Image (tube, grey):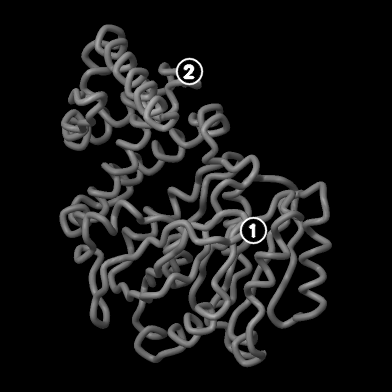
Amino acid sequence: MKEKILTLIIPAYNMEKYLDRCLSSLVVNDESMGRFEALVINDGSKDGTSEIGRRYEGAYPDTFRVIDKENGHYGSCVNRGLAEAKGTFVKILDADDSFDNDVFTSFLDFLMTEDVKTRADVIISDYTEVDNRRTPLKTISFSKHDHSFSKNDLTSNDKKEWFIHALTYRTSILREQNYRQIEGISYTDQEWAFIPMAYASVLFSFGKPLYLYTKGVENQSVEPAIHAKNIWMEMNVIKEIILFYSGALPASAKERAPFLRDRLLIIVESIYQLCLLTLRKYKVPLDALEDFDNCLKTNCPGEYAITNRYSTTIAKMKFFPIRNWRENKRGIMLLQNLAYDFADWYNNLKLNH
């Protein structure tokens, strides 16, 4: 068996509608097929997910493997995949997404170059948001760097777009730290984009859009109504990240890695934004946000203070939603919501005329 330069972990639950599209995007020339393995982690699906995976396993037994398991949610699939991985590097590919087939071949060649193969801790690659017909909507490009670079060289825009679609890790880094994701809940991709970065030093940039992230998939976890219902899950994931940052991560590492602090602030502020602004129409339970707020205040008082500065403009009025909510949970929030309703009404009026 050839050396596997890459393991792809493909969590799959009831994905018969999308899995064939995902797996077919990985079928490349014979030489490249031998360089990677694709682990389809069937998370107790009740449809034809496993059968679709088995079809590819039968056609390409040296590349595709189906692992059937009881349902345990996303994190359990990642954990199982890491335990089985044989590749030098590892990447997650969601079953409702896919790769650009031509770019994938170039990516495998890139991983095989001696410098990347021996030195890279993390490879970042551009990704494209597509609709269900794989029509490109937007490409997220990262700042380009010559040769290898440090995570502290990343720009503020890089940090905002730092999601799993862009990330490939050296497998040994994850294993040496006994990295495991939370099981039983969704949104653990936030962990994948944060915790391993504490142990990464050398980054390489692959400047082509490899990953095709499908927007508008039915029952997608980021769909507003579903996200609002399950926001407590994301809060629990980010609370674990807060505890990791404040406790498991040495203070010296925080000083050497402003990337981690900047990224923490971005994901923490996103929770407040979701609860107070984006998902407000779905009546997100703010008592859960209070618990989240207390966790941040207790464990990261410096970062807690910084979040008071977060501001947004609604209907030409500037608000500090996090600070306003903390200081006056009703009065300011009422005014803020009225301004938001007015902005929505005005924008709809313009669209209809």
Q: Residue type at mark 1: give it.
A: Ala
Q: Pick whichever of labels 1 and 2 is earlier in the sequence.
A: 1
Q: Residue type at mark 2: give it.
A: Lys
Give the side of residue 11 with respect to residue 144, left or right: right
Looking at the rendered structure, the number of numbered marks drawn on it comes to 2
Position above or below: 285 against 39:
above
Expressed as whole percent of the image width and height from the top left, the position of residue 262 reads 23, 49
Residue at image coords 57%, 39%: 185
Residue at image coords 59%, 71%: 85
Judging by the rendered image, the residue that carries numbered circle 2 is 283
Q: Secondary structure at mark 2?
A: loop
Give the side of residue 242 with respect to residue 6, left or right: left
Q: Secondary structure at mark 1?
A: loop
Q: Within 10 Å of the Cα at label 2, are there few (<14), some (14-19), or many (20+) other Cα atoms?
A: few
Expressed as whole percent of the image width and height from the top left, the position of residue 36 reads 60, 80
Q: CA distance from mark 1 to mark 2?
A: 30 Å
Judging by the rendered image, the residue that carries numbered circle 1 is 95
Expressed as whole percent of the image width and height from the top left, the position of residue 165 reads 47, 60
Position above or below: 314 against 255:
above
* Quarter of the figure that contains the N terminus: bottom right
As drawn, the label of residue 164 is none
Residue at image coords 21%, 37%: 303
Position above or below: 226 against 3:
above
* Residue reaching furthest to the top: 331
Give the side of residue 101 with respect to residue 193, left or right: right
